[in-house]
Image: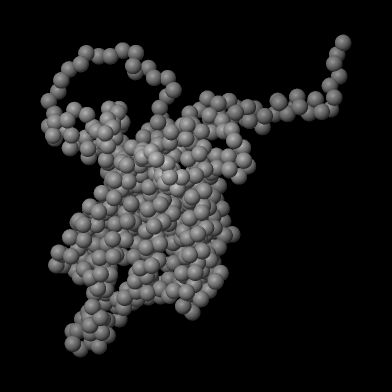
């Protein structure tokens, strides 16, 4: 006897034979078998792809922009440019190929802010936070916990949910608190800079002074960008240079940069320490090894970078130094003597472009903080000495702490390598830090990550060299024979600075990123993701679940090395 299917059952049978159901079943099966890292990268890819299409559409872009009484026509950005901006925002880097304040309307800037927040805190981290704190569900699956551990790293599995809730609550509280603080600051305080800088900027920035709606937008956009160490700004074409003498604003930014750069485990540790003190427990609180290592290394690198940069800048005698730059406007023609040119004489009389010695020292200090994966600048990086450029790119290569909003090889990796070399010199067989022995595999992995990172940076550097004019690009190189008056020349050190900035997801630039060709932009784009996701995690993407290499070993032999 034949069974008569109902219309509903017939629809189900028909749907199960359809392409959509088969595709869904395959994706579900793939999700169950794929590694966590590949799954996270797929989600990241989908988010970036969708967001880049949104930024590419006319809905998010300005067609014209008016400031200082002038109306400027804005060309629509290419898809590669939109993809680059999306990747830079999601990886919390800050390198841009267009001016954020001009190119994007409020909707576009809002998308960039959301991308910065998602990339900085983490998509799966936010998911855990919503499930556990917003929806008040006490249970979290092991799969979701493992995804967060893979995304952020450095989190103990038994602390994941509580650590995420505590850290994200603290970050959101900081965003709200400092968002309103900056709103009031931008409303009541005018941008302040030197006479030379004022001429250099030439009004190419926006001031939200005495404008509540713009101050509110400026306040919260920059708080999100700063606490996530993103480096994006909507002030102008030269980052925070219009606020060069606004030390209060810069101190607020420094606080936000440090909070975002230390990492979730450190924030959780500090929270527990404060609770321990408030409850007045008699036992002594012990910070984790991660907190001690990352914090000490963060401070050590910061002080070292500041002292080296300060020393080289103050002792430099040439014009290529922050200490000696005097900005001369283009209308103060150089073919006339200072004595016969009143305009040029006026600028010479007003002193250096970067103001007093205190102003310059504070600028170097802010820049040193900014190299810790932040990306905001109050100076033109092109004015730094080659030595400062070198030490800054090393600092950006090291990056911020693991489980933070920054990139690079991470502070703990650098600390392990540094201690390993010192221990080798003094004859100690193992790496010991704060009365704890570091696992040998961790030490090996630190050296491998650093070596692979250096190799990767060299490869990307070679690709970006194609953007120089001597290789068909539009960037005027320092080796070009056509050195016109007023035209900047760039060398390998400037390209390396951009590459290191991308890898450390820092966002500091000497002005080259906008001039890179498409191939170089795509290479930088990939490097930003590797820097944010981590070299070790990126390597694991290509790994197989089954390892056939440990089934047998060859006979050991020795080899002479250097």
Residue shown at 26%/34% (left/top)? 435
- Where residue 411 appears, x then y in whole percent? 31, 43
Compared to residue 74, the image places residue 127 above or below, namely above
- Where residue 206 appears, x then y in whole percent? 46, 71
Instruction: Quarter of the image for the C terminus: give it.
Output: top left
Residue shown at 42%/67% (left/top)? 236
- Relative depth, front residue between 29 and 81: 29
- Where residue 69 appears, x then y in whole percent? 49, 79
Q: Quadrant of residue 526?
A: top left
Compared to residue 294, the image places residue 256 above or below, namely below
Residue shown at 27%/62% (left/top)? 364
- Relative depth, front residue between 285 and 134: 285
Q: Quadrant of residue 491?
A: bottom left
In this picture the colour scheme is: one colour
Numbered-mark total: 0
> Horizontally, is 36 left or right of 328 in the view?
right
- Where residue 146 appears, x then y in whole percent? 49, 32
- Relative depth, front residue between 7 and 354: 354
Say whether residue 479 is visible: no
Compared to residue 252, the image places residue 519 above or below, namely above
Q: Quadrant of residue 96?
A: bottom left
Residue shown at 17%/60% (left/top)? 311
Instruction: Quarter of the image for the N terminus: give it.
Output: top right
Say whether residue 539 is visible: yes
């Amino acid at each position: 006897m034949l069974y008569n299917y109902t219309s509903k059952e017939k629809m189900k049978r028909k749907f199960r034979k359809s392409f959509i159901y088969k595709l869904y079943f395959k994706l579900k099966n793939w999700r169950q078998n794929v590694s966590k890292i590949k799954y996270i990268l797929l989600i990241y890819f989908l988010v970036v792809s969708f967001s880049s299409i949104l930024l590419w559409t006319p809905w998010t872009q300005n067609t014209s922009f008016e400031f200082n009484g002038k109306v400027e026509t804005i060309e629509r950005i290419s898809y590669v440019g939109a993809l680059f901006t999306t990747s830079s925002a999601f990886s919390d880097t800050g390198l841009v190929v267009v001016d954020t304040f001009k190119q994007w309307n409020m909707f576009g800037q809002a998308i960039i802010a959301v991308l910065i927040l998602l990339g900085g805190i983490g998509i799966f981290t936010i998911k855990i936070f919503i499930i556990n704190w917003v929806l008040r569900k006490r249970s979290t699956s092991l799969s979701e916990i493992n995804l967060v551990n893979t995304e952020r790293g450095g989190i103990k599995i038994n602390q994941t949910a509580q650590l995420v809730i505590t850290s994200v609550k603290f970050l959101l509280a900081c965003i709200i608190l400092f968002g309103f603080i900056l709103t009031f600051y931008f409303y009541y305080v005018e941008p302040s800079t030197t006479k030379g800088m004022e001429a250099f900027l030439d009004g190419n920035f926006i001031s939200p002074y005495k404008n509540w709606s713009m101050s509110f937008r400026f306040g919260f956009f920059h708080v999100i960008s700063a606490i996530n160490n993103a480096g994006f700004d909507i002030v102008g074409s030269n980052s925070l240079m219009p606020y060069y003498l606004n030390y209060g604003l810069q101190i607020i930014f420094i606080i936000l940069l440090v909070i975002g750069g230390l990492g979730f485990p450190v924030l959780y540790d500090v929270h527990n320490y404060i609770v321990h003190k408030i409850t007045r427990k008699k036992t002594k609180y012990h910070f984790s090894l991660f907190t001690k290592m990352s914090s000490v290394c963060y401070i050590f690198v910061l002080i070292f970078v500041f002292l080296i940069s300060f020393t080289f800048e103050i002792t430099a005698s040439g014009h290529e130094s922050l200490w000696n730059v005097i900005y001369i406007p283009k209308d103060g023609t150089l073919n006339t003597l200072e004595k016969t040119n009143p305009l040029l004489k006026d600028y010479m009389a007003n002193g250096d472009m970067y103001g007093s010695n205190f102003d310059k020292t504070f600028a170097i200090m802010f820049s040193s903080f900014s190299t810790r994966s932040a990306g905001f600048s109050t100076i033109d990086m092109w004015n730094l000495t080659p030595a400062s450029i070198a030490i800054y790119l090393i600092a950006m290569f090291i990056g911020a702490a693991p489980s933070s909003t920054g990139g690079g090889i991470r502070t703990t990796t650098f600390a392990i390598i540094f201690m390993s070399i010192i221990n080798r010199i003094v004859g100690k067989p193992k790496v010991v830090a704060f009365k704890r022995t570091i696992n040998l595999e961790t030490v090996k992995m630190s050296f491998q990550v650093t070596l692979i990172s250096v190799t990767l940076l060299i490869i990307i550097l070679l690709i970006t060299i194609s953007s120089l004019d001597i290789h068909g690009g539009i960037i005027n190189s320092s080796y070009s024979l056509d050195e016109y008056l007023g035209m900047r020349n760039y060398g390998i050190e400037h390209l390396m600075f951009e590459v290191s900035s991308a890898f450390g997801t820092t966002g500091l630039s000497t002005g080259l990123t906008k001039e890179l060709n498409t191939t170089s932009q795509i290479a930088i784009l990939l490097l930003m993701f590797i820097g944010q996701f981590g070299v070790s995690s990126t390597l694991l993407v290509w790994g197989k679940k089954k390892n056939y290499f440990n089934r047998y070993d060859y006979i050991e032999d020795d080899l002479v090395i250097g």
